[in-house]
């Protein structure tokens, strides 16, 4: 613990020095003190550590736009910073800002850093932003996190971004039509893997683009 | 009693009033539970569970009723509904009597969309010799949700009674903004010591809904219900059929089959509507009170078009990470279309929207996330 503290103190001093040299101008006049000073310190440290600062600035501005108190803004920015660190450790140093933001969003939705790392491994050399976002959307739609991760990984080697978005739309539509999240995912993953994702929704008896879709109340 | 709508409640009350003057003042509380299979217009068939407490007071001239209900569908979505109604019968003038009434109701579906109505009305009754037949002409008006203009219902009806049998026929013309329709209903009720049977058939032969805003169409409908008293306190009921939408009271049309049990504090007279579950299921808000309109994104990174399709709005604003969390107004490019061009890089974005200067909320079509700041944002994936 003491070693950690010894490491943190110089980092903070370094950050404060950087803040004194230049502050993020978009925070001025919008983010209240002392939050602005603290967020600037986080930004400086993040920049030094190779993390993207734009998502952190956005989160601070979001808090300011919603009239959040200073402590809440700092806590939100700190949490996002930690999520970005986890996402980067999973996706690797070369991950783009969009990929890290999507990874952080997936972590917040319930995915794990290990599942993101597996996604990176399976989709080597391919963009991760949409895949990670779809993973988060599926979890938010009620699909268990492990199942959602498994589904996204099952498509990872071949699917492009459009395939992922189609897959997500179909699963969400089946859920809206009354299918359980797990059942919807199972049906759609089978269809996607077999290349026949125009199959009817479970239990609806409807198919084809010309048929009006209905859902349960 | 829980009428499907105050109009029909009054229709049913008419033969009670005609048959039972003078009523002995009494208060009755009841609790209904039931299960149904229902298919609302525009929706798939779903099962539902209903829990419905009710209270009613009747005196020779005054009737008051209140009902709450909680309906849970198999998707987990629910309707919470409350309503109150009252009517006062003025003094007699020969065979003519005047009845004044009022009702109010509100409902909320899935914790989001809600609807309310407040109606008042007057009805002029005429009673035949021996109070075995009669009729009335009445009008209802008030406010119905955000509908521009007051709804107006004009009803003419006649009824007749013979021993255990009551017959009713009515014609109602309804105006609701640009929407209008006519309902013709014939109903029969037979009340025996061990069974009460009620049958109604109806038709909406004419309907005008120029922009499909209320899903009002010309249809035929009918219902049948039976109630079997188990003892003084309890009755079993079974019902099924189809009923039309009621835009004034924000209920969808539906076909249903339901069974229920009602426990009451007293059983001095048969209930005017035997099956509570049929009525309370009708509180489902109309599709016009649906979720926020979706936020559409088209175009390439350097010029994305954000588009919202919505009518009857004065302003639409978005605010998100791509605006540095500053509000930007969308321009109305068509009566039902709002747009703005922005630079939005591919990725995952956080966005909120507001209409007519109201509260900020997640746009339709985005993943909702509850933030540390105590509000919700929409997570938007831009490929």
Image (spheres, coloured by chain):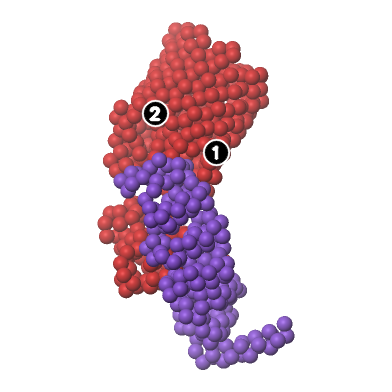
Chain colours: A purple, B red
Residue extending farthest left:
B334
Q: Which mark is residue B139?
A: 2
Residue A95 position within the rendered picture, expressed as x and y whole percent measured from the top left: 47, 77
Which residue is identified by label 1?
Answer: B71
Residue A19 position within the rendered picture, expressed as x and y whole percent measured from the top left: 54, 88
Residue B293 visible in the snapshot? no
Q: Residue at x 49, y 64 (%)?
A: A153
Q: Residue at x 66, y 19 (%)?
A: B232
- Sort mark 1 into few (<14), some (14-19) or many (20+) by Cα contacts within 10 Å: many
Q: Is B127 in front, or is A128?
A: A128
Asked if B25 appears above or below A156 in the picture, the reply is above
Closer to viewer: mark 2 or mark 1 = 1
Asked if B196 appears above or below B250 in the picture, the reply is above
Name the side, left or right, on which B18 lies relative to B310. Answer: right
Q: Residue at x 33, y 72 (%)?
A: B301
Residue A144 visible in the snapshot? yes
Q: Is B87 in front, or is A42?
A: A42
Residue extending farthest right:
A2
Q: Earlier in the sequence, mark 2 or mark 1?
A: 1
Residue B252 position within the rendered picture, expressed as x and y whole percent measured from the top left: 42, 37
Asked if B368 appears above or below B273 in the picture, the reply is below
Which quadrant: the C terminus of chain B?
Answer: bottom left
Which quadrant: the N terminus of chain B?
Answer: top right
Q: Is B130 in front, or is A172?
A: A172
Q: In the structure shown, which secondary structural element does the residue marked by tag 2 occupy?
A: strand
Residue extending farthest front:
A194
Asked if A195 appears above or below B189 in the picture, the reply is below
Residue B140 position within the rendered picture, expressed as x and y whole percent measured from the top left: 41, 31
Q: Which mark is residue B365?
A: none
Distance of mark 2 from mark 1, alpha carbons? Answer: 31 Å
Q: Is B32 in front, or is B247?
A: B32
């Amino acid at each position: 613990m003491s070693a950690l503290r010894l490491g943190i103190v110089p980092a903070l001093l370094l950050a404060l020095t950087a803040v004194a040299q230049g502050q993020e101008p978009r925070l001025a006049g919008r983010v209240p003190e002392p939050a602005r000073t603290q967020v600037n310190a986080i930004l400086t440290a993040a920049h030094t550590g190779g993390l993207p600062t734009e998502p952190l600035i956005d989160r601070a501005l979001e808090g300011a736009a919603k009239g959040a108190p200073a402590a809440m803004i700092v806590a939100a920015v700190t949490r996002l910073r930690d999520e970005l660190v986890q996402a980067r450790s999973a996706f690797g140093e070369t991950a783009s800002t969009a990929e890290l933001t999507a990874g952080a969003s997936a972590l917040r939705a319930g995915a794990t850093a290990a599942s993101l790392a597996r996604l990176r491994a399976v989709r080597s050399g391919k963009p991760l932003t949409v895949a990670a976002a779809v993973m988060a959307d599926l979890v938010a739609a009620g699909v268990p996190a492990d199942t959602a991760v498994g589904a996204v990984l099952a498509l990872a080697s071949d699917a492009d971004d459009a395939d992922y978005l189609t897959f997500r739309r179909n699963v969400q539509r089946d859920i809206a039509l009354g299918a359980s999240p797990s059942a919807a995912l199972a049906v759609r993953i089978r269809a996607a893997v077999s290349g026949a994702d125009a199959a009817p929704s479970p239990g609806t008896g409807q198919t084809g683009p010309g048929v009006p879709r209905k859902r349960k109340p | 009693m829980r009428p499907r709508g105050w109009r029909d409640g009054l229709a049913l009350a008419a033969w009670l009033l005609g048959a039972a003057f003078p009523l002995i003042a009494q208060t009755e509380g009841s609790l209904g539970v039931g299960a149904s299979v229902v298919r609302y217009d525009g929706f798939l068939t779903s099962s539902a569970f209903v829990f419905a407490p009710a209270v009613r007071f009747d005196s020779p001239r005054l009737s008051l009723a209140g009902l709450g209900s909680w309906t849970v569908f198999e998707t987990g979505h629910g309707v919470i509904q409350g309503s109150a109604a009252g009517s006062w019968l003025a003094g007699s003038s020969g065979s003519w009597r005047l009845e004044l009434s009022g009702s109010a109701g509100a409902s909320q579906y899935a914790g989001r969309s809600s609807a309310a109505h407040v109606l008042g009305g007057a009805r002029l009754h005429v009673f035949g010799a021996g109070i075995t037949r009669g009729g009335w002409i009445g009008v209802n008006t008030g406010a119905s949700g955000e509908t521009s203009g007051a709804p107006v219902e004009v009803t003419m009806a006649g009824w007749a009674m013979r021993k255990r049998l009551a017959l009713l026929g009515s014609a109602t013309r309804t105006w609701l903004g640009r929407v209008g329709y006519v309902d013709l209903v014939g109903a029969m009720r037979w009340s025996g010591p061990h069974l009460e049977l009620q049958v109604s058939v109806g038709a909406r032969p004419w309907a005008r809904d120029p922009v499909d805003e209320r899903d009002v169409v010309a249809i035929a409908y009918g219902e049948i219900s039976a109630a079997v008293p188990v003892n003084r306190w309890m009755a079993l009921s079974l019902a099924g059929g189809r009923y039309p939408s009621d835009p004034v009271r924000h209920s969808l049309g539906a076909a249903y089959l339901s069974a229920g049990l009602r426990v009451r504090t007293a059983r001095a007279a048969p209930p005017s509507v035997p099956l509570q579950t049929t009525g309370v299921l009708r509180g489902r808000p109309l599709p016009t009170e649906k979720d926020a309109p979706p936020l559409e994104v088209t175009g390439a990174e350097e010029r994305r078009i954000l588009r919202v399709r919505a009518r009857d709005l004065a302003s639409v604003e978005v605010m998100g990470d791509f605006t540095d969390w500053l509000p930007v107004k969308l321009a109305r490019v068509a009566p039902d279309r709002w747009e703005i061009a922005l630079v939005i890089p591919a990725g995952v974005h956080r966005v909120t929207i507001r209409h007519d200067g109201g509260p900020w909320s997640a746009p339709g079509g985005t993943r909702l996330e509850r933030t540390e700041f105590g509000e919700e944002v929409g997570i938007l994936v831009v490929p």
